[in-house]
Image: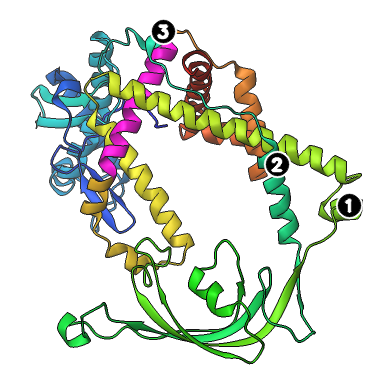
Amino acid sequence: MIETTPQSGGVSTATEESAGHEHEGHSHGAATLNPDCTREVEIEVPADEITRNYQAVTKRYKRMARIPGFRAGKVPESLIRGRFAEQIRQDVMEAVLPEHFRTAIAERQLKPISQPQVTKIDLEEGKPLRFKAAFEVLPEFSIDGYQDVKVEKPSAELTDAEADAELARIRDSRSTMEPVTEERPLADGDYAQISFTGDVQPAEGETEIETGKAPQQPISGQDVMVEVGGPNTLDAFNAALRGSTVGQQLKFEVSYPPDFGERQLAGKRVAYDLEVKGIKKKIEPELDDDFAKELGQYESLADFKQQLRDHLARDKQRRVQAETTNRLLDALVARYEFPVPESLVQQQIDARLDRGLRALAAQGMRTEDMRNLDFDRLRAAQRPSATAEVKSSMLVDRIADAENINVPEEEVENELQGISLQMREPVDALRTRLTEDGSLARIRERLRREKMGALLYERLAS
């Protein structure tokens, strides 16, 4: 979901040409507004108000200025006006523009959702100030018939097979590998401890000279464990290993399918030299009360199984609801056509890129390497998904208005309590901080959308 909390009535004095913002390693200028969502106000400030503000600002600079050769507060006004002309002009604009802009949009009952782009500022002392401010608003659009949009709701009931599979996975994770001491050949169910080298072969009828490519470096591995007859073991490995003994040298070729998971091997033919170093058996723990108690505060195996099943059931319910709700929102987005504010699309692209950059940083990518990324291409790639997310949130908000969905203060308070515990910050201090930076409004907005999404799931998924 996105943030569509309306902007305050403030207005930046940056002009359309200079407005913009930066992110780590990239920047972009002021967003091009969607004409279908753009409104413009033309404002005039009386000359006497401009004069009063010029005089007040100049007096403040005169009082604060420290210029060699003049005592504090005794600098001639003409020198102040000459030396600080641009700063004085900027201060006057910042003093008068926001108030008049707020008045103008209130009179017209407009609610900007983007930072206004101020153009055609004509400011001169003793003359009226005239300027234009363009900004985006949420468009009006119909949601008639949203109740008729239906999607199939898969069963969220946890099956015995799913519960058994998770129990088997947990049991397998607690297994140990024990060496087989008896002299015998490898059989299905054994784990072969192998060392190998593999030479990647050119395709049939090709030579390295014909392909124009350098030969691919050999692959190798030491003391690798391979389950003979295992579901993830290639047939060629099973055939070669089955019946072999410790110390035996094997030579064979493997043709990897085009969709093989390791891209460097997909569709390739590899000649292997392999040595069997040992045989091991997987020893799984007994499923008993002791096993359960090793996993946590469980009274018995039955207690662990029940709690595991309850957890899996809740998790599947959440997952099915989230996936179904997303399909439902996709269906709503496809049904309704309406203009999307460009400022919201850009905000969503920013959010998606920021998440991606944080993920890359967590994986160890250096800041210098991030700066070399092609951000124009990355932004373009994010645009379709970002636009769909904006449309989805706009639809949910509009439906929530129609359904009179509200978030009681106690629900917001519960959310704050959870954040407070997670961040180890006192609730009162957290509330103050989130209110000041606008995050509390976004939290309330998110909770409202989640509540509306849950209601749509119950009504429209069948």
Q: Which mark is residue 402?
A: 3
Q: Name the residue: 50% across, 69% down.
A: 235
Lower sequence index among marks 1 and 3:
1
What whole-number distance in Å separates the C-alpha atoms at marks 1 and 2? 17 Å
Check the image and report above or below for 145 versus 117. above
Instruction: Count how many numbered circles sit on residues in the image.
Output: 3
Residue 163: % across, % down: 70, 41
| Amino acid type of the residue that numbered disc 1 sits on in the rendered structure | Asp
For mark 1, give the secondary structure.
Answer: loop
Q: Is residue 392 magenta?
A: yes
Q: Which mark is residue 81?
A: none
Q: Which residues are magenta?
A: 382-402
Describe residue 50's horizontal placement relative to residue 319 as left or right.
left
For disc 1, the marked residue is 288
For disc 2, the marked residue is 163
Residue 285: % across, % down: 82, 61
* Foreground pick, 259 / 87: 259
What whole-number distance in Å separates the C-alpha atoms at marks 1 and 3? 55 Å
Check the image and report above or below for 273 versus 293. below
* Foreground pick, 166 / 124: 166
Residue 181: % across, % down: 79, 84
Q: Name the residue: 15% across, 47% down.
A: 79
| Amino acid type of the residue that numbered disc 2 sits on in the rendered structure | Ala
Q: Are marks 1 and 3 in contact (CB under 8 Å)?
A: no
Please tell me in which quadrant of the rendered image residue 315 appears. top right
Please tell me in which quadrant of the rendered image residue 26 appears. bottom left
* Foreground pick, 224 / 258: 258
For mark 3, give the secondary structure.
Answer: helix
- Few, some or many residues within 10 Å of mark 1 (<14, 14–19, 20+): few
For mark 2, give the secondary structure.
Answer: helix
* Residue 15 showing in the rendered view: yes
Describe residue 359's horizontal placement relative to residue 343 as left or right.
right
